[in-house]
Amino acid sequence: MNVNGESISGEVEDRMLLVEFLREHLRLTGTHVGCDTSQCGACVVHVNGVSVKSCTTLAVQAEGGDVTTIEGLAINGELHPMQQAFKDNHGLQCGFCTPGMVMSAIDIVNRNGSDVDEATVRKELEGNICRCTGYHNIVKAVHAGAKNMGG
Amino acid sequence: MYSEELVVGWACRKVNRPVKWTSDRTEAFLADAHGRDHVAHAEMAMDKNGKFLAMRVNTTANLGAYLSTFATMVPSYLYAFLLAGQYSTPLIYSEVKAVFTNTAPVDAARGAGRPEATFLLERLVDVCAEDMGLDPAEIRRRNFIPVDAFPYQTPVVQCYDSGDYNAALDKALALADYEGFAGRAEEAKSRGKCRGIGLSSYVEACGIAPSAAVGQLGAGVGLWESAQVRFNPTGNVQVFTGTHSHGQGHETTFAQLVTEQLGVPIENIEVIHGDTSKTQFGMGTYGSRSLAVGGVAIAKACEKLIEKGKKIAAHALEAAEGDIEFADGNFAIAGTDKAMNIAEVAFNAYVPHSYPEGLEPGFDENAFFDPMNFSFPAGTHICEVEVDPDTGVVEIVKYSAVDDFGKLINPMIVEGQVHGGIVHGVGQALLEGCQYDSDGQLITASYMDYAMPRADNVPSFDVDYAPTNPPHNPLGVKGCGEAGAIGAPPAVINAISNALGIKHIDMPATPENVWRAAQTATS
Ligand code: FES
Ligand code: FES
């Protein structure tokens, strides 16, 4: 598979989860694990441009695919507009949910456009839990990021 | 302290290498301490104008199966001592019975004791208002401790140092457009929805805590905080704090504080915490104390540096020490333009070729701070809900919070704490609850069954401040980390009760609970 633009190959057991492959084999520990029931969204990555929960995806399901993790968003040290928006809007406190939030947010904007409304953002972030921010600044960040992504 | 912290230390020594503990989510649900879990009965006596005369509270507090660190302090000095709330009730009787059960240990969770006290009191006040035919805002106003009564000795140990409860209430009423509520309720009714509005005027005791006070209460520790502020010869500053930042933004706020005190550019300041191989002893982050106690320790270390810096600058500038003034990072001879920057002073302290006789080299100071009193943040939160009586689903349509945290150092971080606290409180009010079946099996051991608040359970919030100055705190700060979690639960439940015209509903007010309450209300 292609991970953050680099082609990767490896032998894995059929049952290995994508998140384990990313974190333990590739040492891409930006993708987090926050639960064991596919509820929290800390593990969200993109496979072929679409957000998936990597804790509920087998590594072999992504075989041959393009995987983007939070580490793959910044280009030459310049943050992705959505990362920058989270930073500017105080969209994170402890940061545990943040990688998954940012990956989900980008997917939300890709699917709904840069003028996506608050109700849609909130509804579509339903699969990402944050204990710290109360979501207020995350929603603000998603809107700011959406604008910047739109150019 | 969690037992895994001890186990990890023990395991380290056994295998002679670093050991890390990770629990999965289900293990955390099963074994981490749970929070709240009181059963309380409260009565209020009033005169014919709705003035509170006396309150009696009986509480049973679950400690779980094992005693954990703060377990007994939560329902005692963090709960019973807060039962006066914002009111001048002259007589308060409180009896707390702590019981062991077969649940996980119950210990401190954001607010610890103060959300329980506030929930009980603010629900009781709303029931009193209804019984007296008074508006909930009016009954609060009639009973608020007046602004000229501070310092105010409550009948339950705490002595509040400062506050202006009317100011926060007035601002919150305006922010929430309380006046316009009747019209909005009418409109909702035409859509088959019940709209309700709920107030919560909370006070909390944080900035934990004066060691002497907690000692009298039986705590086995001192609750001071420590700091070390170290200049390097380059003029860069390292700030070592005994508190710990896990999302509270101390790295930013403390650096701002040092910039304000010492005039050093913020990018030259590094805040170091949480590494016991680097930092001095500290008591940690809890009870909204990091800035109110730890921040003061940092400021005191800065003051010591300024005192020492005056001696060094006086020597270098060939002036009397008494003539040196410090402002904006410069030591200057008063009334002249002869000055030295603090970075040069630091360099002199490490390269003391020409230096005051007898003065220790180095520019590095320690300080400890033990507060004289708790701090008492307070405020009014107003929640507006729309209930669907057919499904029991509660939508929070508007939430306004006006808090008194004293002086704000970083308003953006403070506001973030308020948002997060509110949603923690909304979670408690509407969604979260640890449930055991009759065999003692935890049936909410995953996020599938334990409902966390999610982005679509809450709106964006309107947040404002009504600050007063706490005389006990040298920085004028009160602490803000727990306020939302304390203010929110009664605001939400008062709003639901108002919407349905009911006197009681238990938390969490799940759709099922609300639907059942709606059925009784209409039948
Ligand atoms: S780790 Fe929680 S949803 Fe994947
Ligand atoms: S920032 Fe801490 S969980 Fe979201």
Image: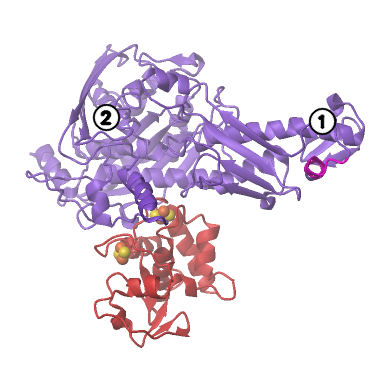
Left or right: B428, with B521 as reference point:
right
Residue that numbered label 2 is attached to = B123
The answer to which quarter of the image holds residue B492 is top left
Q: Is residue B432 visible?
A: no
Q: Check disc 2 and report its element: helix, strand or loop.
A: helix
Q: Where the N terminus of chain B falls, by quadrant?
A: top left
Mark 2 residue type: Arg
The answer to which quarter of the image holds residue B260 is top right
Residue that numbered label 1 is attached to = B311
Residue B35 tag number? none
Q: Colour of chain A?
A: red
Q: Is residue B166 above or below residue B284?
A: above
Chain painted purple:
B
Q: Check disc 1 and report its element: helix, strand or loop.
A: helix
In x, y percent, where is residue B13? 39, 50
Distance between the alpha carbons at the discs numbered 1 and 2: 59 Å
